[in-house]
């Protein structure tokens, strides 16, 4: 596992297409790798945004999951919510790997910043 | 870590070089339920080399775990990584060598059905037999099965041999116990409260598929893992949910033992600690004559003693390896080199050595006889012996003397003693050899400060390099103000600059002090205490009593000019239960002509070696 860490950021960016549509207030993720089973459950998306993205609050959003297309679409009512998540998604993979590395090295300070999750 | 330049007698070199890969394209993963004799369904994940042609038959490595055979990763990691990425043994390494690799959840755990009252129950062990029957019926199986594991899975690997199935050809128990009472739950009769409680808590939450608890205790796992992986066909999770329901009647060691004291105390199902030990199954393991490669570390809990007891007591062809790493060899643990950051051999080196051992057992004559490889700290060299204790082994007494010294001469004075008010704040903290069973690093830091709370005796500088290998025996003549209590003894090295380094320790609850003359249930090299209720007795306050017990085995070189120190405590608050539960005992240790307290140190004599 440790030997994979340095390449994880690149693998994530390569494997997942993220598109943001400011007009439709929608963000979509498409996983290019073949996945056995469901691509994600809706609650997993929220956990991902809070755990790795630093989201602190509950943002109203519609989560549409297309398992066949391996696509997830997040639709927002408010522009400010869309912008908040759009900004998170710009760095979420880097943050996820950095957090994992930090914790594996024994520094758990950032774990304390993650809000309670229904996981 | 062991010194990578320590080539001579290095078991990882002697077990052979890394051969070319037979399969280079990775592996396929599948999972299924295997139904065993009483109808319980055991979840199994199977890894086969990619490109295996239908007419090729291959042997199987099996690992039976209670910590989830496979994990469902969190997104986004699930989208890019194979779910077996952090499994041990590494499926890439094993399958590339031409082996099938099977991981199972033992009954009552993971995605398997059933429930459990104790670990390593007879039913759990017998499941291994049924699983082998299933394996050898598979079209890819050549009829040979071997098992390996570390810690829990190490013991399941060793007990796999007890099934005496003709398809089982070799086992590799890594960091496993021999006697769960003394090796882990009650070392010296003292309850390892911290580990047993935390281990039971983690086990319960694993069995209920509740990874939320990892946030506090294993945050890296929490960030990465969503839960146990269901078997492939269980898309709607119905099977998994039914299995989890059955786990809700599981029982856990902490609840079963927190109020217990004695080896023969009955657990809730009427069994005792010995019933799920390895030594109770000795005859059946020997009958199989299956070759064993066991490995462990001097710094790992009481498991360092377990590997020696296994070596001394099992007649099976055997290789034993004792190094200087933490539990499972993920981290270095040699206290003389605290700044080392990685372990040698690497995980891949180890797995390749293990596979070479399996190849010998499956395809050639196997191994003959017994050999133990042990690493000597400070000397930073591997040694090899066909017997334990090694040739040249003898004991050297060091007496407790006035001015808190250790001397070779027995005291001549008629009176002499030292009084110590037990300090219940004394601790080795949470990175000691007992907490290490959870995979934590092992660091005994700040010994100068720690020892300020203890009663310490120190020798003069050694006149020559001296190798100590084996179990130190501590003999105290003491009185106490209370009927119950415990002794925690730390054996340390002091260099020319006064730096103190922990070497090993021992603990002992004083009510168990009776030394029995009858044969113990297995061969040991230290005084025999039964830890049974009938042999226990409270101390009589004010009356001198002999307390003699062994410390955990070690191998270390005390360099010329260094001194040795024995530091005595009455508590280790972050790990062990407090004895007595209430009160503040004062102990007095005698050091005079009549009652000469001493330590007996196992020396390896140079000239004989």
Image: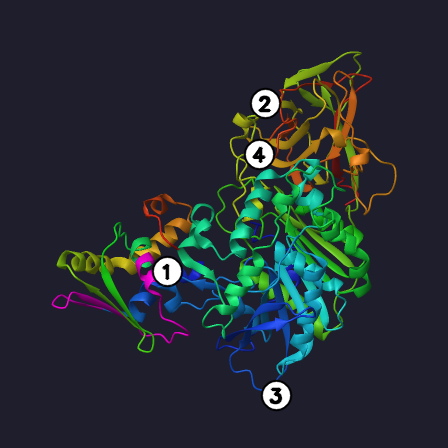
Label 3 and label 4: CA atoms lie apart by 58 Å
Dot 2 corresponds to which residue? B423
From this viewpoint, which residue is outermost toward the bottom?
B55
Quadrant housing residue B226: bottom left
**Chain that bears disc 4:** B
Tell whether label 1 touches label 4 (CB within 8 Å): no
Dot 4 corresponds to which residue? B501
Asked if residue B338 is positioned above or below residue A17 in the image, the reply reads: above
In percent of width and height, residue B490 lies at 64, 32
Q: Does the magenta stretch include residue A40?
A: yes
From this viewpoint, which residue is outermost toward the left?
A23
- Magenta span: A19-47
**Chain that bears disc 1:** A
Dot 3 corresponds to which residue? B55
Dot 1 corresponds to which residue? A6
In percent of width and height, residue B247 lies at 57, 58
Crowding at mark 3 (Cα within 10 Å: few <14, some 14-19, many 20+): few
Q: Does the magenta stretch include residue B433?
A: no
Residue drawn at (52%, 82%), measured in percent from left and top? B51
Instruction: Give the mark nearer the N terminus: 2 vs 3.
Output: 3
Asked if residue B26 is positioned above or below residue B197 in the image, the reply reads: below
Discs 2 and 4 share one subunit: yes
Label 2 and label 4: CA atoms lie apart by 21 Å
Query: Which residue is nearer to you in this view: A93 or B412?
Result: A93
């Amino acid at each position: 596992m440790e030997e994979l860490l340095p390449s994880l950021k690149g693998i994530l960016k390569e494997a997942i297409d993220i598109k943001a549509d400011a007009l439709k207030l929608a963000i979509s993720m498409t996983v290019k790798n073949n996945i056995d089973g469901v691509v994600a459950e809706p609650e997993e998306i929220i956990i991902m945004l809070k755990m790795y993205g630093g989201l602190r609050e509950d943002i109203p959003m519609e989560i549409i999951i297309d398992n066949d297309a391996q696509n997830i679409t997040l639709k927002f009512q408010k522009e400010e919510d869309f912008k908040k998540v759009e900004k998170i998604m710009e760095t979420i993979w880097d943050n996820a790997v950095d957090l994992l590395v930090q914790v594996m090295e024994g520094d758990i300070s950032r774990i304390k910043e993650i809000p309670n999750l229904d996981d | 870590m062991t010194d990578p330049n320590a080539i001579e007698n290095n078991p990882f070199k002697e077990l052979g070089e890394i051969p070319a890969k037979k399969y280079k394209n990775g592996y396929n993963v599948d999972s299924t339920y295997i139904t065993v004799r009483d109808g319980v369904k055991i979840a199994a994940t199977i890894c086969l080399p990619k490109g295996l042609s239908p007419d090729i038959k291959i042997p199987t490595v099996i690992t039976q775990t209670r910590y989830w055979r496979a994990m469902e990763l969190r997104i986004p990691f699930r989208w890019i990584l194979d779910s077996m990425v952090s499994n041990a043994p590494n499926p890439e390494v094993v399958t590339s060598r031409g082996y099938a690799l099977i991981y199972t959840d033992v009954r009552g755990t993971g995605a398997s059905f059933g429930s459990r009252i104790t670990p390593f129950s007879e039913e759990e062990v017998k499941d291994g037999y049924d699983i082998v029957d299933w394996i050898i019926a598979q079209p890819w199986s050549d009829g040979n099965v071997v098992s390996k594991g570390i810690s829990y899975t190490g013991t399941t690997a060793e007990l796999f041999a007890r099934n005496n199935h003709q398809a089982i050809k070799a086992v590799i128990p890594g960091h496993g116990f021999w006697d769960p009472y003394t090796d882990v739950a009650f070392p010296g009769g003292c309850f390892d409260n911290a580990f047993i409680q935390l281990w039971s808590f983690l086990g319960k939450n694993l069995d209920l598929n509740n990874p939320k608890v990892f946030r506090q205790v294993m945050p890296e796992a929490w960030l990465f893992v969503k839960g146990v992986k269901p078997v492939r066909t269980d898309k709607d999770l119905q099977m998994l949910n039914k299995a989890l329901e059955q786990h809700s009647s599981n029982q856990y060691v902490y609840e079963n033992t927190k109020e217990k004291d004695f080896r023969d105390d009955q657990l809730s199902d009427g069994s005792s600690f010995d019933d799920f030990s390895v030594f109770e199954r000795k005859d059946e393991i020997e009958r199989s004559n299956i070759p064993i490669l066991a490995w462990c570390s001097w710094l790992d809990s009481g498991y360092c003693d377990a590997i020696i007891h296994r070596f001394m007591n099992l007649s099976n062809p055997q290789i034993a390896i004792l190094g200087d790493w933490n539990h499972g060899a993920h981290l270095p643990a040699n206290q003389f080199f605290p700044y080392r950051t990685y372990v040698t051999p690497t995980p891949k080196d180890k797995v390749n050595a293990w596979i070479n051992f399996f190849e010998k057992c499956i395809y050639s004559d196997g191994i003959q006889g017994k050999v133990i490889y042990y690493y000597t700290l400070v000397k930073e060299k591997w040694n090899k012996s066909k017997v334990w204790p090694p040739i040249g082994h003898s004991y050297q007494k060091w007496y407790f003397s006035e001015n808190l010294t250790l001397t070779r001469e027995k005291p001549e004075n008629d009176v002499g003693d030292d009084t110590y008010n037990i300090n219940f704040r004394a601790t080795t903290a949470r990175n000691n050899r007992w907490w290490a069973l959870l995979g934590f690093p092992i660091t005994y830091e700040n010994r100068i400060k720690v020892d300020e709370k203890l009663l310490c005796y120190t020798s003069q500088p050694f006149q020559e390099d001296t190798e100590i290998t084996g179990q130190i025996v501590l003999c105290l003549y003491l009185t106490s103000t209370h009927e119950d209590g415990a002794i925690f003894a730390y054996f340390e090295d002091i260099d020319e600059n006064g730096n103190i380094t922990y070497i090993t320790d021992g603990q002992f609850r004083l009510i168990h002090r009776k030394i029995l003359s009858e044969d113990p249930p297995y061969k040991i090299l230290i005084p025999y205490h039964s830890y049974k209720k009938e042999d226990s007795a409270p101390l009589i306050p004010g009356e001198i009593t002999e307390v003699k017990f062994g410390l955990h085995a070690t191998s270390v070189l005390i360099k010329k000019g260094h001194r040795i120190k024995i530091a005595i405590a009455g508590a280790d608050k972050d790990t062990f239960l407090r004895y007595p539960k209430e009160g503040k005992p004062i102990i007095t240790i005698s050091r005079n002509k009549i009652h000469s307290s001493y330590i007996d140190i196992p020396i390896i004599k140079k000239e004989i070696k």
